Amino acid sequence: MLNIIWPVFIIISFMYAIVTGRVNEVNNGIFEAVSDAVELSITFLGTICLWNGIMEIVKKTTLIQKLTKLLNPLVKVLFPDLKHSQKAKEEISMNMVANLLGLGNAATPLGLKAMKTMQEENCKKDTLSNAMAMFIVLNTASLQLIPTNVIAIRTSLNSANPTQIILPVWGATIIAAVVGVLATKLITKKIK
Amino acid sequence: MVNYISAAAIPFIILGIIIYGLIEKNKVYDSFLEGAKEGIEIVFKMFPTLVGIFLAVGALRSSGVIELIVKIVEPMTKMLSIPSEIMPLALLRPISGSASMAVAVDIMKNYGVDTFVGLITSTIMGSTETTFYTIAIYTSAVGIKKTRGILVAALLADFAGMIASVIIWRIMSTSFC
């Protein structure tokens, strides 16, 4: 996708600059952009390493397993088709907990495991089952308790209050998730 | 109150996590270093994208194309009451994680990280995912071809999250100022 968008952006910019006589501004803009990328990466380095380190501590504890149990009732409601597969439900909960804690690189392998388990019970192997559809949409909704990457970047950009966004992020995430769940229920009922 | 909770959140989270790790008798410092090392990789992997996207967005901005587009979509974004400055982010968010992060950084740098636009940008980045990538990776891993239109459901969820981000900050900024 970006293989099309990226060159189009650049070509349009250069053509427009030639037409409007802003070639000089574009020249400066390009080199400013590149040095900005260097400067920002260096400031990101500290904050992103900090959060990754803290989250690695979480990964090594039994917190994921404990929170998984708390999620069980919710998983039962969202995945009514998985009555008989305790294993699938467990893997789904673990993936959701990893997402909640912002452990992106732990969440994906767990999610793939859950998909494989659900695929074993799927009767049409080339089509998503209801449970799988719900699972993927929940994963695209980014259920996150602490949006660590965004906080890290806000800190790097000298925000007066980098964590000010936590509560609004919860609000927006919950709304997105509810819309996603309802839309998936409707769509999987319509399209078999 | 909201500000206090948010400001106190991070120190308490870090403290809580470290104490929890100690209770379970983990080598917390070793774990921390291991994770921090992975952080370097994340930034390294992000760097080429930052250069690429900053180049494209920098060209769009300095040539005046962004101004032009913002003017064109303004009537539509006004109707939905979305600030037109975040339109590039809204369009790119479901497609590419690193590219949308670079665009978000660009927006926050140019319009201010604590401004209305900057706060909405942060909230969108925190509350949405790279929808196309997520669907692709989970379906391809088990050989699924028919996705029964969940892309529509997921994009609807993204759209709802974005609108919610705008509305939440509209409410918060009127009650604070």
Image (cartoon, rainbow, N blue to C red):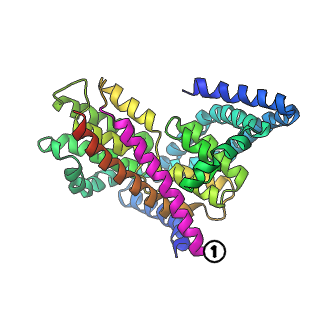
Residue B67: image quadrant is top right
Residue matched to label 1: B177
For label 1, the crowd category at 10 Å Cα-Cα, with few meaning under 14, some 14 to 19 and many 20 or more, is few
> The C terminus of chain A is located in which quarter?
top left
Q: List x then y, in percent, for residue B99.
A: 59, 36
Q: Is residue A96 left or right of residue B111?
A: left
Q: List x then y, in percent, for residue B82.
A: 57, 54
Can residue A152 be seen by looking at this rendering?
Answer: no
Q: Is residue B143 left or right of residue B48?
A: left
Q: Residue furthest left?
A: A84
Q: Residue at x 56, y 54 (%)?
A: B79
Magenta segment: does it hold A117?
no
Q: List x then y, in percent, for residue A104.
A: 44, 43
- Element at badge 1? loop
Q: Relative to B19, does residue A8 appear above or below in the rendering?
A: above
Q: Relative to A184, does residue A66 appear above or below in the rendering?
A: below
Can residue A121 be seen by looking at this rendering?
Answer: yes
Q: List x then y, in percent, for residue A115.
A: 28, 34
Q: Residue at x 85, y 31 (%)?
A: A23
Magenta segment: does it hold B170?
yes
Residue A87: image quadrant is top left
Mostly what secondary structure, the magenta segment? helix
Magenta-colored span: B148-177
The chain that hosts pointer 1 is: B
Q: Amino acid at mark 1?
A: Cys
Q: Is residue B145 left or right of residue B33?
A: left
